[in-house]
């Protein structure tokens, strides 16, 4: 009788611990149609921009009320990067070697600091692993995080050099038009 009662108590305690962890950890999926990611760059002819049309990913909070991030992953289909100019897109895909490397990946490695700004808004300083053309680099990233019910929005921008990822800046017209090495990625990523 006592053994049965102990088993019931231990079983109920174990169940409640699992339930409390499940309730606290919350996962949200990236909403492609509401998210934007634009890569801005320069060339010897004019400035340019290219948009990511296919993104996926998820964000997981260990504690949503405290905005305690556990995971964040974003993937971009490399050939969904579109400029509106097919020749520029072809040069981009060639530079990124999209026949071999189909996706660009970002994965959160750690949150360095998260500062509450009020009204569900936080300023986050983090480190993450960015993989472009098969080359993975750990990068610092600052972004704004907005929690609005079941909608999470990350907004920010990051400058980086293509050559850091072994991507040769594209050229056109037999090398007479050259692309600058530094690009800026601006993003508004929505999870729900």
Image (spheres, rainbow, N blue to C red):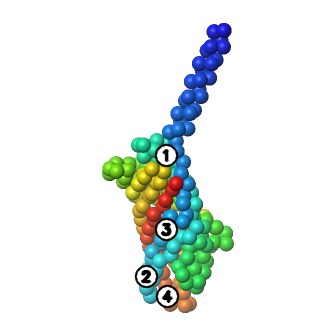
Residue identifier under label 3: 37
Dot in front, 2 or 1: 1
- Horizontal and vertical percent for residue 33? 54, 66
Specify whether residue 61 is in view.
Answer: yes
The tag earlier along the polypeptide, 1 or 4, is 1
Query: On screen, 141 above or below 185?
Result: above
Dot in front, 2 or 4: 2
The N terminus - image quarter: top right
Dot in front, 3 or 2: 3
Q: Residue 131 lies in what quarter of the image?
A: bottom right
The tag earlier along the polypeptide, 3 or 2, is 3
Residue identifier under label 1: 61
Dot in front, 3 or 4: 3
Disc 2 and disc 4: Cα gap in Å? 12 Å
Disc 3 and disc 1: Cα gap in Å? 22 Å
Q: Residue at 64% across / 67% down in the picture?
A: 102
The tag earlier along the polypeptide, 2 or 4, is 2
Disc 1 and disc 4: Cα gap in Å? 45 Å
Specify whether residue 129 is in view.
Answer: no
Q: Residue at 46% across / 80% down in the picture?
A: 48
- Horizontal and vertical percent for residue 172? 54, 87
Within 10 Å of disc 1 (Cα), the crowding (few <14, some 14-19, many 20+) is some
Residue that protrudes farthest toward the left in the picture:
117
Within 10 Å of disc 3 (Cα), the crowding (few <14, some 14-19, many 20+) is many
The number of discs equals 4
Residue identifier under label 4: 177
């Amino acid at each position: 009788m006592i053994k049965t009662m102990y088993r019931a108590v231990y079983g109920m305690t174990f169940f409640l611990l699992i339930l409390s962890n499940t309730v606290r950890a919350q996962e949200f999926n990236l909403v492609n149609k509401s998210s934007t990611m634009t890569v801005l760059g320069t060339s010897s002819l004019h400035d340019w921009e290219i948009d990511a049309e296919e993104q996926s990913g998820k964000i997981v909070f260990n504690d949503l009320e405290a905005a305690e991030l556990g995971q964040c992953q974003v993937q971009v289909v490399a050939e969904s990067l579109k400029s509106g100019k097919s020749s520029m897109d072809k040069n981009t895909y060639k530079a990124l070697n999209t026949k071999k490397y189909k996706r660009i990946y970002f994965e959160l490695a750690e949150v360095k600091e998260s500062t509450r700004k009020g009204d569900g808004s936080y300023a986050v300083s983090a480190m993450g692993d960015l993989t472009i053309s098969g080359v993975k680099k750990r990068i610092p990233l600052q972004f704004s995080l907005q929690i609005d019910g079941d909608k999470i929005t990350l907004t920010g921008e990051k400058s980086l050099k293509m050559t850091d990822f072994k991507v040769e800046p594209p050229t056109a017209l037999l090398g007479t038009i050259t692309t600058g090495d530094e690009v800026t990625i601006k993003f508004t990523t929505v999870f729900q």
